[in-house]
Image (tube, grey):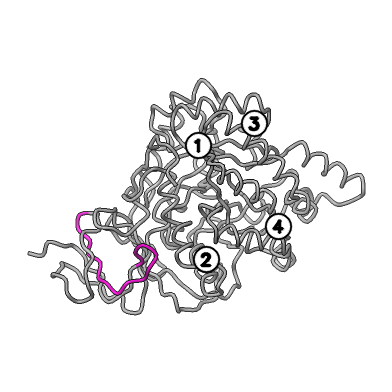
Amino acid sequence: MADYDICFREGRVYLWGQLLDIDLYVAEEKIALLCRRGEGPSAKQVISVAGKIILPGVIDLHAHTRDPGYTHKEDFFTVSQAAAVGGVTTWVDMPNVEPPTTTVDLFQEKKARAEKLSLVDFGHFVSGVNLEEIPRLAAAGVTGFKIFQVSGAYPHDPRLALNDEGKLLQCFRAIAKTGLPCLVHPFNQSLFDFFSAEAFAQGKPRNHVTFAEIYTREVVWKSAIASLLALQRESGVRLHVVHTHAARSLRLLREAKARGQSVTVEIDPKYFHLGRKDLEEKGPQVCPAGFIPEDRERMAEIWRSFHDGTIDNIGSDHAPHTKEEVEKQRSDAWAAAMGNPQYDHYLSVLLNDVHEGKISFANLVRCLSENPARILGIFPRKGGLLPGSDADLVVVDFERERVLSNDGLYTKVQWSPYAGWKVKGVPELTMVRGKIVAEGGKVIGEPAHGRFIPGVPQEMNL
C-alpha cells in the first residue's frame, strides 16, 4: 500500500524563489515529500502536470463576502467557489456586513455559517472600533481587526468608520495588547468631503467619473497615512494598511519600514490594472479606479514598491455588487455601491503581469502567498510548498492564453471588470489541504471543507 495519497509528477514546483523540476507528494492534507523528478516512491494517485507550474495557494487578506446581510451579492459558498477557480485557497473577509461584525456573538455566528458553506479555508477580520469588545473578540479567536477611515454609502459603513485621532489611538493601544494585526482603510474623509463640495460648486456631476477623480487624489491618502504612522509609533500596534496606491503614501511607508516601524503594506489589483480605457468602456464597474494606470509617477512608484519590498501583499478587495447597484453611480456615486468582483479572474490577470515583465514570479508569490501567511502568523504551515505544510497549491498553465469572459463565472453577481481582456496564464487545478476543489475551471469541491484560521498573536515577523 502506497504511503502517499497523490503525486504531482513532471511539473515545475515553486520553491524558495525558484522553479524546480521536482515531483510533489501529498499525504493526509500535508505536503509530504519533494523529490527529483521520476525518482520518488509510488502513490495512490498520480497526476501528470507536465508543462505546468505548481505554486503555493493564494492567501487573500481582503475579501468582501457580503455574508450575512447582503447575500444577494455573494455568500460564503459562492465566494469560496469563485476563490477556488481563481487559485485562492484561503480568504479572510471584512466586518462590513449586516449586522456588522462587532461582537463575539456575531463573530461566532458568522464563523459557524462559513464553516458550513466554504470550500476553502477562511478567516474573519472584525471591527476594531469598540474598545470594550477588542479583548473579548481577541480571546474568541478572531483573525484580526479592521478599521475604516472612509465613510458614506455602503460598503463604507458609517457605523464602522473612525477618523478621530484620539479614539484611533485608544483602539490602536487596545489592539496592540492582543498581538493581532490591525488593518486600516486609510482615508482623509474631511478632505474628500471638502473636495466633493468644491467640485459640486463648480458644476461637476455627482457621477462615477467625478468620484474617481476625487477619491484617488494623492493628498486624501498621504495625509491619512502620515497620521496613521504617527499613531502606530505611539501605540506599537501591528499596522497593516490597505489600498496603498498613492505614490507619496508609498514613500512614507518605505521610510517608516526603514525606521523599523511595525507596518505592512497592501495594494489591490484594480489600482494598477483598471485605467481610463476601462472606465470609458465599463463605466461604474471599474470605479473608484480608472485614472491611476495613466499616472506615470504613481505607476512607477507602485512597481518600484513591488521590487523593493515596500508592498508586502496583494489583497484582492473582492467586492461584488450587482450591475444594477453599481450603475446607480452614474446619477449619484456618493450614494451608490462601489467595488468589483475579482476572484474568478484574479490569478490569470496577475500571471499576465509576470509575462509582461512588470513583476517577477518571486515577488508575485511573496505578495500572494508567503507574506500573507506571515502576516497571519501561519507561515510555513501555509504560504509555501514545504514538507509539513498544508497541501494548499495551484497548478497553472503559464503559457495558456485565454480571453476572459462573464460566461461561467462563479461569483454570484455574474460579471467581472476584466471581461474581454486577453491574458496569458491560467489556473488549472486548485487544492486545499490535500483535496482538489477546482479543476479545469470548474468547481469540484464541496461545502464545509474549509476550516477557520484563528488569529496568532505575534510580533511583526516580515
Q: Residues within 10 Å of mark 4 (few under 14, many from 20)?
A: many
| Residue placed under numbered mark 1 in the picture | 238
Magenta-colored segment: predominant secondary structure: strand
Give yes or no for contact between labels 2 and 4 (Cβ–Cβ under 8 Å).
no
Please name the amino acid that badge 4 sits on.
Pro
Compare marks 2 and 3 and give the one earlier in the sequence: 3
Question: Residue 364, how many percent across, how many down?
Answer: 48, 62
**Residue under label 2:** 350
Q: Earlier in the sequence, mark 3 or mark 1?
A: 3
Q: Is residue 70 left or right of residue 391?
A: right
For this rendering, which residue is in front, 17 or 272? Answer: 17
Q: Residue at position x 41%, y 54% from top? A: 370
According to the picture, the residue beneath numbered tag 3 turns out to be 162
Q: Magenta span has 15?
A: yes
State the separation of the CA atoms marked 4 and 3. Answer: 27 Å
- Magenta residues, start to end: 14-28
Q: Check if mark 2's residue and mark 1's residue have beta carbons within 8 Å.
A: no
- Disc nearer the start of the sequence (2/1): 1
Please give left or right for residue 361 compared with residue 211 in the image.
Answer: left
Q: Earlier in the sequence, mark 4 or mark 1?
A: 1
Disc 4 marks which residue? 284
- Real-space CA distance between mark 2 and mark 3, rounded to the nearest whole angstrom: 33 Å
Q: Residue furthest top?
A: 132
Q: Name the residue type under label 1.
A: Arg
Among numbered discs 4 and 3, the one appearing first in the sequence: 3
Q: Residue at x 53, y 33 (%)?
A: 127
Q: Position of residue 251 (x, y in %)?
A: 65, 50
Res 193 quadrant in image: top right
User: Residue 369: x and y, percent?
Assistant: 42, 56
